[in-house]
Structures are given as C-alpha cells and as structure tokens.
Image: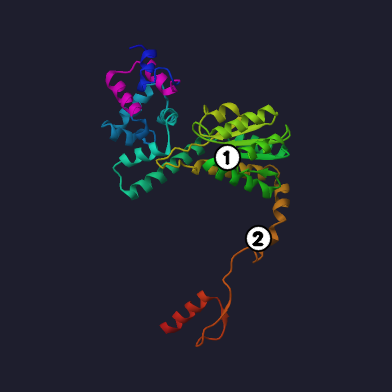
Amino acid sequence: MSARNELDGKDGNHGKTSPTSLEVRFAQSQLSRSRRQLIRAILDNHEEAFFLSSREMAKRYHVDAATIVRTVQALGYERFADFTADLRKHFVTQITPYTVLKAATREKRSVPDHVRHCVERDTENLSVLRSSLDADRVVELAKLIHRSRRILVVGVDLAASLAWFLAYGLTPLGFNADAPIGSAGNLQHKIDVLTNKDLLIAISFGRCLRETVESVLRAHERGVPTFGITDGNTTPIAMHCDAHLVAYTSSPSFTGSYVAPMALMNSIIAASAHIQPKRSLDMLGRTEKEYRSGERWYQEPLRPAKPGGDGDLRADGNSRRSRKKHQAK
C-alpha cells in the first residue's frame, strides 16, 4: 500500500481531514513489520496511549521500554517526548472530555492510583516547561506589556480562569489589563476599541476554541499586536498570533492540566515586575498599608468568656484551648 493510500484509508476518513504529522511519518517510514504493528496499535488506540510514559507504554504493548524508544527513533524522533507531543496532536483532532475519561477508565488503576497518575502527569508537564521555556521570549512579552496602553487577555470556557489570573496579576503592577467575560458580543466590543498601541493575549489549547481564534483574527484586522499562550507550535493560536509561548496541558483528567500554563503565567507576571522594579515597587507600595493592617485579613471576633471562665475577653478558639488546659490539670 502506498503512503498516500495508507493515509486515505486511516479510520475510513478518505481524505476528509488532513493527516497529522505522526500519520505522515508512519506512512512514509521504512519500519520493520514488528515496529509497524507496534506504531499501528498505538495510533489505533491513541486516546489510551498519548499520556503514557515510555515505561507505561511498553507495559501496555508487552515490550520493553528500549523497544519503544528505538521504534520512535526509527520514525525520526530524537526523543520520546517529541513522539508523545505529535501523538497528542494526533489525539486532539478527536479529543473530547468523554474520550479522555473513557480512556482513563480503561486503565486498571485504583482511585488513589488515578490521583497519583494525575499528579505525575502535572509534574511531567512542569518538567517539560522548565527544560524548554524560552525565557527571552517571556521577557519580550513583558516588554510588550510595558509598552501597551491596554492589555486584553482572552480566554474562553475553562481557559477563562487563566485569563483572569494573568489580568489580575498584571493590574497591581499598574497595567490596564482586563479579561472580559460574558457573551461573544461583549468580547468583540472590547476588541473593537483596541488600537495598535494595545495588546491582545489569547489563551487556548489543542484545536483551540473558535471565539478565541476569531478574537485574534479580529484584532489583526485592527492592527492590534497579538500574543498566544497555547500547547503546541501548530495550534491555531500559534499560527495566527504574532508570537506565542507553549505550555503542555496533557492529562488523564478530562479537564486537562493547567499546572504548566499557570506556572507560565507566573513567569510572565514576574518578568513584568522585574523589568522596571522601581516602578513595580512604587505601584505595590500603594497597597502596602492595607496588606499590613488587620482590616484585610479575617480575624475571629472577640466574645465574652462563658460563666466559670477566667473572665477575659478572647476568641472562642482560645477559650476552648484554655478550658482544655485547665481540665488537664
């Protein structure tokens, strides 16, 4: 079977969707029969394999980890992480919360094991971010934030939490940052008042949500600079924004993992603060008194001691501790 025919016959698509990078590599490779069968099995069960480590994948397909690594290298990947990145891109063409949870339920794990597996995957995502993060690009974004009159951070659905966090973190530093919520119309109105002196930061992952991508396109029509936060170099956000940063979100949880994107947000806020530290300190100094005062923080109300106590006014918790101590004597 030719490479083109093999691609056309995949899952009965017959050319309805473009082949993924992994499918192209597989179709054009000169793998041995056993390796081809292994990759074919992985592709056919991508929803169950994309979040596995090399050891877990080896166990699933009854081979050793070295065989997995050598096979993906035969496909042209230098590292197993590069293979899993393409496997995830292959997976997200069909990803839904249902398919993720369905794949996870097929794992023979106890509930505590599922918990640990989620944390392990979060840790791996953080590790990848730490090793691959382009700190200079983070600094470039921070400089762009400083030059911008207004910053509009766009995140839809669950990514709205990330957009809100970034906008909130930039505001105390003196930036006019906003993460609009509500209808698509409200978002469009916010974009329509932006100019080339402003900045739009778009956050979306995988196939990327339509409203977020259309916000980028709408901003481009107005000459507004755009910056993307996404989980791959080939996502719609990466392709349509002027520049972008990558943080992986893969997880056995149907919600995905926002641990690495959250860490990336923190790095952006930190860079924005340290480019002009005196300015940042001046801005934060305005709220220093409020932070140090007791008015900002919750305090247990003082109540009269109950009859038989020592007569002091104290918080209920202290009264109970005092009585226990007295009874112990």
The one nearer the camera, 89 or 95, is 95
SS for dot 1: strand
The one nearer the camera, 96 or 186, is 186
Instruction: Give the residues in magenta.
Output: 18-44
| Crowd rating for badge 1 (residues with CA inside 10 Å; few <14, some 14–19, many 20+) | many
At a point 37% along the width and 33% down the height, the residue shown is: 47
Quarter location, residue 66: top left
Point out residue 227 in the picture as x, y percentages from the top left corner.
62, 33
Q: Amino acid at mark 1?
A: Gly
At a point 33% along the width and 30% down the height, the residue shown is: 45
Quarter location, residue 270: top right
Q: Of discs 1 and 2, which sits in the foreground? A: 1
| Crowd rating for badge 2 (residues with CA inside 10 Å; few <14, some 14–19, many 20+) | few
At a point 69% along the width and 31% down the height, the residue shown is: 224
Which dot marks residue 103? none
Q: Residue furthest left?
A: 62
Q: Residue furthest bottom?
A: 308
- Separation of residues labelled 1 and 2 (CA atoms): 29 Å
Q: Magenta stretch containing residue 30, yes or no? A: yes
Q: Amino acid at mark 2?
A: Tyr
- Label 1 belongs to which residue? 155
SS for dot 2: helix
At a point 45% along the width and 84% down the height, the residue shown is: 326
Ranked by sequence position, the earlier of labels 1 and 2 is 1
Which dot marks residue 291? 2
Q: Magenta stretch containing residue 87, yes or no? A: no
Q: How is the image coloured?
A: rainbow
